[in-house]
Image (tube, rainbow, N blue to C red):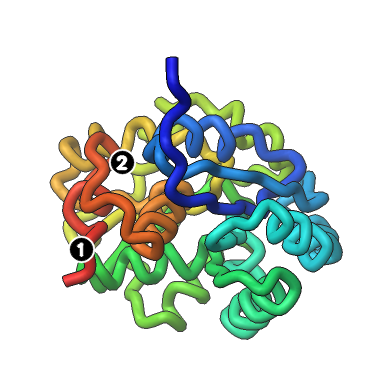
């Protein structure tokens, strides 16, 4: 059997303790796009843990550039949500300076996905402790959104986040959903939720945006390689082509 034709390569910077991003990207990205990963040391979703991963960004960005990727995604939403907008902008600059490649951050793709969906009022369902969930609310508020409800599962151990039962994720989403919310946001690339996005949208009657879904959307929109990707919710089904 012939190997699929590769038209593009993308690079992802992911936490060392993450076990979900790789299988989800391999499962759902078009076969014409090859995905390459570099790991940043991070095991705890705490200030210390999110600061430690930052030490690896430059070196690992250079490693991805050696694979001649077209674009690099920093796939760690919690770091930007916790450290803020100035950090997020500087992070993008550092990755691009180190690699010579275009870069985007997971938080940036979530914000732009919500803007593309034309929603203002959102509910937030996180795996994080209250402090990081509050930081997430602040980040999204400063980007112009009204966060009408927010709840977290209080995890700090990042490896354990991937072990959360998808039904627990579904319960959390239903707990934050309300009439005022125009969309649900689920940050955390290690949270098992991408496979149930379409089901949750059907249940709730509104868009659901996750870290990995928004990351795939941002990368494919940048590449212009496909015009839709079914099975992963409204964002990838209807909004891959700029209008």
Q: Earlier in the sequence, mark 1 or mark 2?
A: 2
Residue 224: x and y, percent? Answer: 32, 60
Identify the residue under disc 1: 180
Q: Residue at x 37, y 39 (%)?
A: 30
Residue 209's place in the image compared with 182, above or below, is above
Instruction: Identify the residue position indicated by label 2 in the image.
Output: 174
Q: Residue at x 33, y 32 (%)?
A: 196
Q: Eyeballing the image, is 145 above or below 198? A: below
Position of the N terminus, as image quadrant, is top left
Q: CA distance from mark 1 to mark 2?
A: 13 Å
The percent position of residue 44, horizontal first and vertical second, equals 77, 48
> In this orientation, does residue 151 appear?
no
Would you call the spot at circle 1 few (<14 residues within 10 Å), some (14-19), or many (20 or more)?
some
Side of 16 relative to 165 (left or right): right
Q: Is residue 65 visible from the viewing direction of this image?
A: yes
Q: Left or right? Give the position of 220 relative to 6.
A: left
Write down the quadrant of residue 76 in the picture: bottom right
Q: Residue at x 53, y 50 (%)?
A: 9
Toward the top, the furthest residue is 1
Task: Describe the element under mark 1 as helix, strand or loop.
Answer: loop
Q: Secondary structure at mark 2?
A: helix
Do labels 1 and 2 touch, CB within 8 Å? Answer: no
Indicate which disc residue 227 carries: none
Q: Is residue 45 above or below residue 93?
A: above
Image spot of residue 157 (x, y percent): 73, 40
Structural crowding at the residue carrying mark 2, measured as other residues with C-alpha within 10 Å and reported as few (<14), some (14–19) or many (≥20): some
């Amino acid at each position: 059997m012939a190997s699929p034709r590769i038209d593009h390569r993308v690079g992802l910077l992911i936490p060392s303790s993450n076990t979900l991003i790789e299988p989800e990207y391999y499962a759902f990205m078009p076969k014409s796009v090859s995905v390459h990963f570099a790991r940043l040391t991070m095991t705890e979703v705490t200030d210390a843990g999110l600061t430690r991963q930052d030490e690896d960004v430059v070196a690992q960005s250079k490693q991805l550039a050696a694979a001649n990727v077209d674009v690099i995604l920093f796939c760690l939403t919690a770091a930007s949500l916790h450290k803020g907008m100035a950090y997020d902008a500087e992070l993008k600059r550092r990755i691009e300076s180190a690699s010579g490649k275009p870069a985007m951050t997971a938080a940036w793709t979530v914000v732009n996905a919500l803007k593309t969906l034309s929603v203002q009022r959102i509910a937030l369902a996180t795996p994080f402790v209250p402090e990081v969930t509050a930081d997430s609310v602040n980040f999204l508020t400063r980007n112009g959104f009204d966060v009408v409800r927010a709840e977290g599962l209080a995890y700090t151990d990042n490896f354990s986040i991937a072990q959360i039962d998808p039904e627990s994720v579904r319960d959390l989403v239903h707990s934050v959903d309300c009439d005022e919310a125009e969309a649900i946001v689920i940050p955390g690339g290690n949270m098992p939720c991408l496979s149930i996005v379409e089901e949750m949208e059907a249940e709730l009657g509104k868009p659901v945006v996750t870290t990995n879904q928004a990351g795939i959307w941002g990368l494919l929109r940048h590449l212009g390689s496909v015009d839709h990707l079914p099975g992963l919710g409204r964002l990838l089904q209807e909004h891959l082509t700029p209008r």
